[in-house]
């Protein structure tokens, strides 16, 4: 007969924690994204630009995979970024049939400004929090970052 462990009973189940994190993350990002209208770039373009700025130049297929869209959709997104001067397209030197997409300086600047506005919005939301709550959230953010990093490395 399995022994009852009171400490185990007090721990939240992984599914419950996952559900709460999912809900909290969605609400948090909705608040932050309210600032994205000031960038005057649609969310799909802003997201793709973010991948390029933080991930570096990449092929269309890589970018489509990162954004979880099909290549034709990403082609339209990239064309819009190029028209706006936020990204440039170059032929891949190793294969002329392929292209490399790179964020321009203007694109990097726009993305950093959008990120700053989102972070400031979140900081405003947190302005009424106690030091203890802020410390807890900081520790939680660290744990989330570590768990995601481990998952990405295939350790979980």
Image (spheres, helix red, strand yellow):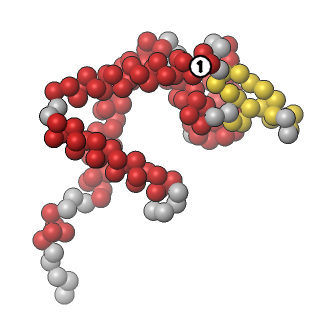
Q: Is residue 62 left or right of residue 45?
A: right
Q: Is residue 12 left or right of residue 64?
A: left
Any part of residue 48 in sight: no
Q: What residue occupies the far left of the structure in this picture?
A: 6
How would you rate the neighbour count of disc 1 (Cα within 10 Å): few for under 14, some for 14-19, many for 20 or more?
Answer: many
Q: Which residue is mark 1?
A: 107
Q: Nearer the viewer, residue 26 or 102?
A: 102
Residue 38 location, x and y as percent?
43, 12
Residue 99 in the image, given as x and y percentages of width and height: 77, 32
Of the 4 image quadrants, the one containing the N terminus is: bottom left
**Residue placed at 46% from the left, 52% from the top?**
149
Relative height, residue 118 to residue 145 (above, below): above
Residue name at image x 62 percent, y 19 percent: 105
Relative image position of residue 22 (x, y in whole percent): 33, 43
Image quadrant of residue 133? top left
Q: Nearer the viewer, residue 127 or 37?
A: 127
Q: Residue at the far bottom: name it.
A: 1
Q: Nearer the viewer, residue 93 or 43?
A: 93
In the image, taking residue 156 as reference, residue 92 lies left or right, namely: right
Task: Please tell me whether mark 1 sits on a helix, a strand or a loop.
Answer: helix
User: Where the C terminus falls, by quadrant?
Assistant: bottom left
From the viewer's perspective, is residue 37 above or below residue 70? above
Expressed as whole percent of the image width and height from the top left, the position of residue 109 reads: 54, 18
Residue 12 appears in the rendering:
yes
Marks counted in the figure total: 1
> Residue at image x 62%, y 41%?
65
Residue at the (12%, 71%) spot, across then down? 6
């Amino acid at each position: 007969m399995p022994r009852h462990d009171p400490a185990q009973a007090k721990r939240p189940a992984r599914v419950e924690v996952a559900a709460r994190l999912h809900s909290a993350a969605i609400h948090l990002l909705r608040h932050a994204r309210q600032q994205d209208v000031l960038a005057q770039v649609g969310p799909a373009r802003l997201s793709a630009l973010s991948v390029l700025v933080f991930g570096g130049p990449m092929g269309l297929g890589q970018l489509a995979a990162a954004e979880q869209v099909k290549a034709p959709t990403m082609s339209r997104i990239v064309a819009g970024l190029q028209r706006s001067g936020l990204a440039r397209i170059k032929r891949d030197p190793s294969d002329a049939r392929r292209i490399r997409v790179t964020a321009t300086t203007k694109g990097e600047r726009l993305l950093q400004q959008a990120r700053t506005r989102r972070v400031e919005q979140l900081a405003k939301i947190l302005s009424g929090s106690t030091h203890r709550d802020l410390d807890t959230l900081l520790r939680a953010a660290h744990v989330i970052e570590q768990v995601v990093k481990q998952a990405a490395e295939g350790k979980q």
